Image (cartoon, rainbow, N blue to C red):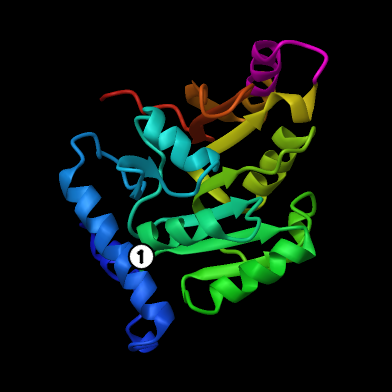
Amino acid sequence: ISQPLLQRVPQKLGDSDEALELRSRFDQTVRVFREHPNVANPSVLFQRGGVPQPVGGRHAQVRGADGGLDNIYIKPGTKLLYLGAAAGTTVSHCSDVVGPEGIVYAVEFSHRPGRDLVNMAKKRTNVIPIIEDARHPQRYRMLVGMCDTIFADVAQPDQARIVALNAQHFLKPGGNFIISIKANCIDSTVPAEAVFAREIKKLQQEQFKPAEQLTLEPYERDHAIVCGSYRVGKKKAKD
């Protein structure tokens, strides 16, 4: 078990009811991590009815890791820009993974889930909540440093453009991206496969280099994860 995961339960909570509940869930997490034979990635597992399940419920990131992505580009020390943070459930798991040496810049436009995101971040010093429209990264450019990875789950028709704009501002050359594509949110009049192909082409035009694509069936219908690298320079020729 990684050190960031061991820091999941804040000691300052003492023996409060909240602390007891957190420790109970933490003990359950450790048990499943040690016993489940297929755990080979940092997505945390919990037991539901005796069956291991990824935390985050319907969140695409943990579904992708559970479904077989070779790399989700989030590890201890990662500087992560998370677009579409919602109330911060999956952001909190990313916070655990990146640990005290990493940071999660969590961007959410809606104010109602944004309040929950801010409250969650009060207990996690490596989460920076940003309540702003991801279409305008210049509005929060003073808050975000250069990042290793962008994760996007904004479910908007112009999602590829949103990711590209943020990458231009904050993603270092050679950095990585993970984008959750919900076909019905982009164009419900054509087959999902056509939407995925079109979005990948848009990403390639913006200097993204997709490396993996994974559909999230049977967890999610017409939903895929695409990940890869950004502005990858050509390898120098050998002398």
Q: Is residue 230 above or below residue 9?
A: above
Q: Residue at x 40, y 64 (%)?
A: 102
Residue 119 point in image, percent of width and height: 61, 75
Residue 187 point in image, percent of width and height: 80, 22
30 is within the stretch colored magenta: no
Q: Residue at x 61, y 43 (%)?
A: 152
Q: Is residue 180 above or below residue 119?
A: above
Q: Which residues are magenta?
A: 188-200
Which secondary structure lies at badge 1?
loop
The image quadrant that residue 203 belongs to is top right
The residue at which mark 1 appears reads as 99
Residue 67 point in image, percent of width and height: 40, 28
The amino acid type found where label 1 is placed reads: Gly
Q: Is residue 71 visible?
A: yes
Q: Residue furthest right?
A: 189
Query: Which is more toward the observer, 163 or 191?
Result: 191
Q: Is residue 204 left or right of residue 190?
A: left
Q: Is residue 143 visible?
A: no
Residue 21 point in image, percent of width and height: 38, 72
